[in-house]
Image (cartoon, rainbow, N blue to C red):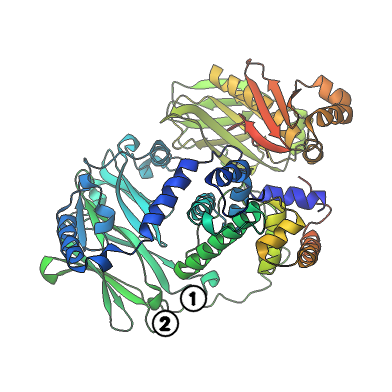
């Protein structure tokens, strides 16, 4: 979606309604709680609505929204570090917090940029170019980061692991 | 990405399929923050603002809970009195938490909490977030309390309050963690309750000689107790500045009680590496008979090789009277003996169950603490892996319904489990992600006669949506709607889970 010279409220609303679950999933992956994810998504779109004039239409509206979401999550993480309180781990949809412990550990050990790329790719369902736009890096860098991250994550999934 | 990696990543994060977007909320937030980002009024009219702030402070000092401002007052005052009767009722889900407190507790320790009377009495800042304090009276003159997503406790009876001048002053604490790079022995949060009506002030004393007032609420009768939760400022998370003591004092500074934190290093554990080497964990041996024994009138039922007797006093006795193939297979292994009552409490359907985990035995008995009457069913459940189609037909190793409701529960659960096992299988995760028509054809082709023999029906709802459904013998239909490979809607809870 490309909008020239400022984004309209209708376009932002449309993106919100269309991609709400994707933003939520990404927020949950980064922040680890549905409550905070919901808050981050609301804050992202409120910020976008407030500063929609500043969107110059040089990239896609979606890319701009993802960048805003990343900034909001970064602020929340920074704020949380300041208050530094360990929030209780939430259950996933299948009700088992202990699922995929090796994978969780490997994700936690990924460099920040790689982790974000994986989350944007998987939970945000963005293409390599879109991830590059959101993260402000070149598509090639995203490709390499994703490749590197996947290899690391694969190593944590033993072939005998069955569901 | 590999399929398995994709599945695993998908598994880590909820799909939020039931989550509804709230655009009105976004617009309201945007407006609110836009207004807030203008030049602040205190810079435009400093004198007027100072006068207003003073007036607000006065209002806050005089405020009652009916004004709904107690959460702000907590930051200003040592003690804030809150009227229990004027406080809003707690949400049903919280009332149910209070109701579940006696589950598994022996009768003498059951708090007898009056869950229907639970109320929200204050909001505290815990970990930098607003968290509610819920309290409920007990039927024996005590109370139970819970800080939202934090600690809680009960003083079951009037006698537990030790009403005298000092009363009770319970201080729980939380230490640092490696994640926060704070030593575990450093106190980072304290919370608790107090019962001395004369309590006026809680004071924290730090190793650097400084002190701080800790705000607390005093909740009126029938609770008649005070509560506090306080995040120790990060500046006191070091050895030189750490919390040393918390003192409770009355008006005029008279100290009522004090809790000190000594920070004595724990003695090291005796080094005995050989102690556990080669020792296999032994299966837990369960009590053969219930103590007390089931009292009359009893309910006795027999099924799947077991006879179950449930007494009026809530004790249960399992006795094996025959063998079945699955019981023979499980011999010497661990199982769970459970009984349950089906209830709808505060509008929430609940399987109120209690069980014991241990070695499969011919006789097992125990009291069903907190389950209540009538007991609807009992079962012996084995920890065996299940794959669709399940060789036990989605049943426990032994299912003994005691009532019609229990019989229906077992039937419904078997159907829900069957559908869940089918939809969530690894292969299905791949198949169901295809466009709906192709997915249906591929699923039918893959599972062939097994699917035809099952009661599972697959409907193409739209180009990207499939609906799986199955009807139980009680005529209840369970369904899972899958949109673009993800669960969009389902009604399997609380019988089974699907992802």
- Tell me which chain the residue with mark 1 is part of: B
Residue at the (77%, 68%) spot, across then down? A141
- Tell me which chain the residue with mark 2 is part of: B
Residue A150 location (% of width, % of height): 79, 60
Q: Quadrant of the C terminus of chain B?
A: top right
Left or right: where does residue A155 sit relative to residue B208? right
Farthest front residue?
A5
Which numbered circle lies on residue B342?
A: none
Query: To which quarter of the image does residue B429 belong?
Result: top right
- Depth check: give the residue in front, B438 or B343: B438
Asked if residue B305 can be seen in this view, the reply is: no
Residue B169 location (% of width, % of height): 27, 61
Left or right: where does residue A134 sit relative to residue A91? right
Q: Is residue B208 above or below residue B141?
A: below
Residue at the (69%, 28%) spot, across then down? B395
- Depth check: give the residue in front, B169 or B10: B10
Please name the residue that numbered disc 2 is placed on.
B239
Please name the residue that numbered disc 1 is placed on.
B183
Could you tell which of marks 2 and 1 lies nearer the N-terminus?
A: 1
Residue B67 location (% of width, % of height): 21, 47
Pointers 2 and 1 in contact (CB under 8 A)? yes
Marks 2 and 1 on same chain: yes
């Amino acid at each position: 979606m490309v909008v020239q010279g400022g984004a309209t409220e209708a376009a932002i609303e449309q993106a919100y309604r269309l991609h709400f679950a994707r933003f939520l999933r990404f927020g949950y992956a980064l922040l680890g709680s549905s409550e905070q994810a919901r808050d981050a998504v609301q804050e992202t779109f409120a910020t976008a609505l407030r500063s929609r004039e500043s969107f110059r239409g040089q990239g896609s509206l979606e890319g701009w929204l993802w960048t805003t979401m990343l900034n909001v999550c970064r602020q929340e993480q920074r704020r949380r570090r300041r208050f530094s309180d360990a929030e209780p781990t939430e259950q996933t949809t299948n009700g088992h917090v202990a699922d995929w412990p090796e994978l969780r550990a490997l994700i936690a050990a990924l460099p920040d940029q790689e982790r974000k790329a994986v989350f944007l790719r998987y939970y945000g369902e963005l293409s390599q170019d879109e991830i590059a736009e959101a993260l402000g890096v070149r598509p090639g860098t995203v490709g390499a980061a994703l490749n590197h991250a996947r290899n690391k994550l694969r190593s944590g999934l033993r072939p005998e692991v069955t569901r | 990405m590999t399929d398995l990696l994709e599945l695993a990543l998908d598994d880590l994060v909820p799909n939020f399929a039931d989550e509804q977007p709230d655009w009105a909320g976004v617009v309201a937030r945007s407006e609110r923050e836009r207004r807030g980002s203008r030049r602040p009024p205190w810079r435009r009219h400093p004198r007027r603002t100072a006068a207003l702030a003073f007036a607000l402070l006065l209002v806050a000092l005089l405020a009652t809970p009916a004004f709904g401002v107690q959460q702000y007052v907590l930051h200003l005052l040592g003690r804030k009195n809150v009227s229990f009767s004027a406080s809003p009722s707690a949400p049903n889900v919280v009332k149910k938490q209070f109701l579940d407190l006696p589950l598994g507790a022996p009768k003498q320790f059951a708090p007898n909490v009056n869950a229907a009377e639970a109320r929200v009495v204050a909001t505290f800042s815990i970990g930098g977030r607003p968290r509610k304090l819920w309290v409920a009276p007990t039927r024996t003159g005590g109370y139970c309390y819970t800080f939202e997503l934090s600690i809680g406790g009960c003083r079951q009876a009037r006698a537990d309050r030790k009403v005298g001048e000092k009363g009770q002053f319970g201080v729980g604490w939380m230490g640092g963690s490696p994640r926060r790079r704070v030593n575990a022995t450093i106190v980072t949060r304290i919370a608790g309750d107090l019962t001395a009506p004369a309590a006026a002030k809680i004071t924290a004393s730090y190793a650097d000689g400084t002190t701080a007032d800790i705000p607390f609420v005093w909740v009126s009768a029938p609770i008649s107790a005070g509560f506090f939760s306080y995040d120790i400022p990060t500046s006191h998370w070091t050895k030189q500045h750490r919390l040393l003591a918390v003192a409770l004092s009355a008006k005029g500074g008279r100290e009522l009680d004090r809790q000190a934190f000594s920070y004595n290093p724990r003695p090291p554990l005796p080094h005995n590496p050989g102690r556990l080497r080669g020792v296999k964990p032994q299966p837990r041996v369960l009590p053969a008979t219930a103590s007390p024994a089931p009292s009359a009138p009893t309910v006795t039922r027999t099924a799947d090789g077991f006879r179950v007797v449930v007494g009026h006093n809530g004790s249960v006795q399992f006795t094996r009277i025959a063998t079945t193939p699955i019981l023979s297979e499980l011999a010497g292994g661990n199982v769970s003996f459970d009984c349950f009552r089906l209830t709808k409490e505060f509008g929430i359907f609940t399987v109120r169950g209690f069980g014991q985990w241990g070695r499969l035995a011919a006789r097992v008995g125990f009291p069903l603490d907190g389950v209540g009457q009538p007991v609807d069913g009992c079962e012996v459940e084995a920890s065996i892996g299940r794959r669709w189609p399940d060789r036990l037909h989605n049943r426990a190793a032994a299912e003994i319904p005691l009532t019609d409701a229990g019989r229906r529960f077992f039937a419904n659960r078997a159907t829900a489990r069957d559908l869940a096992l089918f939809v969530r299988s690894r292969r299905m995760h791949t198949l169901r992600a295809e466009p709906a028509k192709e997915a249906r054809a591929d699923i039918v082709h893959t599972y062939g006669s097994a699917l035809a023999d099952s009661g599972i029906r697959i409907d193409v709802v739209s180009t990207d949506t499939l609906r799986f459904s199955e009807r139980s013998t009680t005529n209840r239909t369970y369904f899972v709607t899958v949109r673009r490979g993800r669960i969009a809607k389902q009604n399997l809870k609380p019988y089974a889970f699907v992802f």
